[in-house]
Image: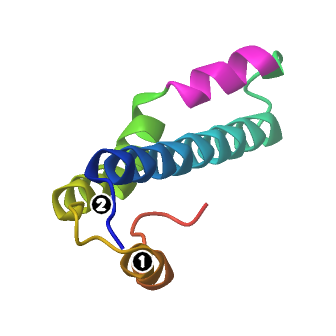
Amino acid sequence: MKIDETKSRKFIREVIVGFKALDTELLAHKMVFEAFVRSQYSDADRALEFARTSPQVQKIVRQKYDLHLERLLKQADESLLVDTLLRWFGEWKPTGPVN
């Protein structure tokens, strides 16, 4: 089976970008929740947007995903099979703080 390299790269990029977006959202909600517990914010929407774009959240998400994305894109070629990608997702152990 021939794998289209362009489509493989696009798929990998979209999956990792989706993971990053979900992780960013989760970390932002966690930060806002903790802030409300400490009564630091009164406007939840503003606080949540601040948390989403905070350098700390962005740094955590970049550290978790960017190296994996680069590695996967380098490996994405005609011989990349769906089984290889599924095995990587099954074995992937992200580092960083627990969400």
Q: Quadrant of the C terminus?
A: bottom right
Q: CA distance from mark 2 to mark 1?
A: 9 Å
Instruction: Point out the stretch of residues depicted in magenta.
Output: 45-53
Q: Is residue 38 above or below residue 89?
A: above
Which percent across, then down, holds residue 44? 81, 22
Applied colour scheme:
rainbow
Is residue 42 part of the magenta span, yes or no? no
**Which residue is found at the position 36% from the left and 54% from the top?**
8
Give the main secondary structure of the magenta stretch: helix
Mark 2–mark 1 CB contact (< 8 Å): yes
Q: In this image, 6 relative to 92: left or right?
A: left
Pick the residue in front: 9 or 19.
Answer: 9
Q: In this image, 71 relative to 81: left or right?
A: left
Which percent across, then down, holds residue 17? 47, 42
Q: Is residue 9 above or below residue 57?
A: below
Crowd rating for badge 2 (residues with CA inside 10 Å; few <14, some 14–19, many 20+): some
**Which residue is found at the position 77% from the left and 41% from the top?**
33
Q: Give the secondary structure at mark 1.
A: loop
Pick the residue in front: 40 or 75.
Answer: 75
**Which residue is found at the position 27% from the left and 61% from the top?**
72
Question: Which of the 4 image quarters holds residue 34?
Answer: top right
> Which label was assigned to residue 68?
2
Question: Which of the 4 image quarters holds residue 40?
Answer: top right
Q: Amino acid at mark 2?
A: His
Q: Amino acid at mark 1?
A: Trp
Which percent across, then down, holds residue 23? 57, 49
Pick the residue in front: 13 or 30.
Answer: 13
Crowd rating for badge 1 (residues with CA inside 10 Å; few <14, some 14–19, many 20+): few
Is residue 48 part of the magenta span, yes or no? yes
Residue carrying label 1: 92
**Which residue is found at the position 66% from the left and 47% from the top?**
26
